[in-house]
Amino acid sequence: MTRGCPFDPPAELGRLREQEAVSAATLWDGSTAWLVTRFAEQRAVLSDGRFSSDPTRPGYPHINAGSSLVRRRSKTMMAMDDPEHEVYRRMLTQDFTIRRVEALRPRIQRIVDELIDELIAAGPPADLVTQFALPVPSRVICELLGVPYADHEFFQRLSGALVSGGSAPGEVIAAGLELRSYLSGLLADKLREPADDLLSRLATERLATGQLTTVQAADMAVLMLIAGHETTANMIALGTLALLENPDQLIELQKDPEPRFVAGAVEELLRYLTISHSGRRRVATEDVEIGGQLIRAGDGVVVTNDSGNRDPAAFPDPDVLDLRRPARHHLAFGFGPHQCLGQSLARVELQVVYGTLYRRLPTLRLAVGLDQINFKQDMLVYGVHSLPVEW
C-alpha cells in the first residue's frame, strides 16, 4: 500500500524521521516533548534506565487529561521503573512463559474453530469484529485470568471507555474504578474458592501473604484484562483488512500453512500495522544524548513505534506488506525492560487465527467498500469499529 493509506503512520512522522531522529513537539496540554522517530534511537531510549516510565514525575508526557488522571491514581507495573517494576513483573511471568502459552494453543484453536463454526452457521454477511475478532481474545484472557466470560459486555464497555481518546476525564476515572471494584470482588471470591487461574494465584500467593494489597492486585488484573483482549482483537480485525487489501499476501498465507511461515507472517503484520499509536512514553531522569540531540533531565520523550517500524534503515521497503520479510525485531511489543509481558500469548492467538480463518473461509471478502470502514482514529489502540465481511 502507498503512504497515506489507513494502515500507514501519519505522513508527518515519516518526514520527521527522514530529517532527524529526535524532534521537538507540542503536546495536547501545551507542554513540549521530544519525538523519537527512528528505529535505532527508539531501541536506545527504551533500553536506557535513565528514561523513566513513572507518570508522577514532572515532565512526563501524558497522552491526554484522562490518561493523566488514571495513571496518577492507579499505578501498574507499566508505570514503574526497576527495581520496583521487576518485582511486580516477576509475579506474573510464570503465567506468560512460552511453555505455558504453548500449552494453551489447543484450547485457543478450539475457541477459534468454534467461533468460525458459528459464523458459517449464521451465514454472511457478518461483522468480523463483534462475531470473531473480539470474542477470540476475550474468551482466552477470561479463561487465563479466571474471569467469567458471561461478563464480557460489561468489561468490554469499561475497557472501551478507558482506551478511547474521546472519553472525558471523569468517564475514564469512573470506568477505572468500576473495573477495579469488579476485579476486587473476583479476587475475594478466589481467596475463598481458588481455582487453576491467574487471579487465584494472585489472591492466594500475593494477596493473602500481604505482598499485594487488594487495590494493587486488582489494578494488575485490570491491566491484564484490558491488554489481553483490546490489542489482539484489533490486530485480528485490522490484520484481516490489511490482507484483504493485499490479496497477493493473503494468497501466500492461504497456500502455505506451515507454522514457521504463519509465525513469520504474524511478525510482519505486527510490524506493518503497529496498532499502538500513542507511542511509548518516558521522562528523562538525567541529561542524555540521543541521535545527536541533548535531552535534559525532566524532558518528556515519546517513542513513536509505528514510525520506527517503518524505518527503512531497519526494514527495507517498509511501507510494503511482505509476509516473507524477517520482521521479528519490530517494536510493536516495545523493547527493553517494559517489553510487553503478554507478547507470547498474543503471538499464539494471532498464529492460530491467521492460520485458520482464511483457510476455512477461503472466499472471505469485504461486504462494503474500504471507504465505508470506520477506523478507530479516536482510540489509543488503532483498529476498526466494525468489519462487514461475506464469503
Image: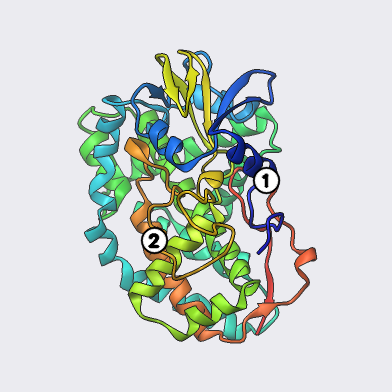
Q: Where residue 357 sits: x, y (%)?
A: 51, 78
Pointer 1: residues within 10 angstroms few (<14), some, or many (20+)? Answer: some
Which image quadrant is residue 75 in? top left
Q: Are marks 2 and 1 in contact (CB under 8 Å)?
A: no
Residue to which mark 2 is pinned: 347
Q: Is residue 65 left or right of residue 94?
A: right
Q: Earlier in the sequence, mark 2 or mark 1?
A: 1
Identify the residue at horizontal 51%, vertical 40% (top origin): 38
Residue type beneath disc 1: Pro
User: What residue is at 61 percent from the left and 46 percent from the top?
Assistant: 160
Relative image position of residue 102 (x, y in whole percent):
27, 65
Residue 164 visible: no
At a point 34% along the width and 44% down the height, the residue shown is 189
Q: Which mark is residue 10?
A: 1
Total count of labels: 2
134 sits left or right of 100 in the view: right
Q: For this rendering, which residue is in front, 378 or 47?
A: 47
Q: Residue at x 42, y 14 (%)?
A: 287
User: Residue 11, relative to residue 42: is it above or below?
Assistant: below
Q: Amino acid at mark 2?
A: Arg
Task: State the quadrant of the N terminus.
Answer: bottom right
Look at discs 2 and 1 and give the one toward the viewer: 1
Q: Left or right of 140: which side holds 250?
A: right
- 92 in relation to 251, above or below: above
How busy is the neighbourhood of tag 2: few (under 14 within 10 Å), some, or many (20 plus)?
some
Is any part of residue 250 visible from this angle? Answer: yes
Coloration mode? rainbow
User: Could you tell me residue 319's position as x and y percent?
Assistant: 59, 58
Vertical order, 180 against 49 (above or below):
below
Judging from the image, what secondary structure is the residue with disc 2 in?
helix
Query: Disc 2 versus disc 1: distance between alpha carbons?
Result: 26 Å
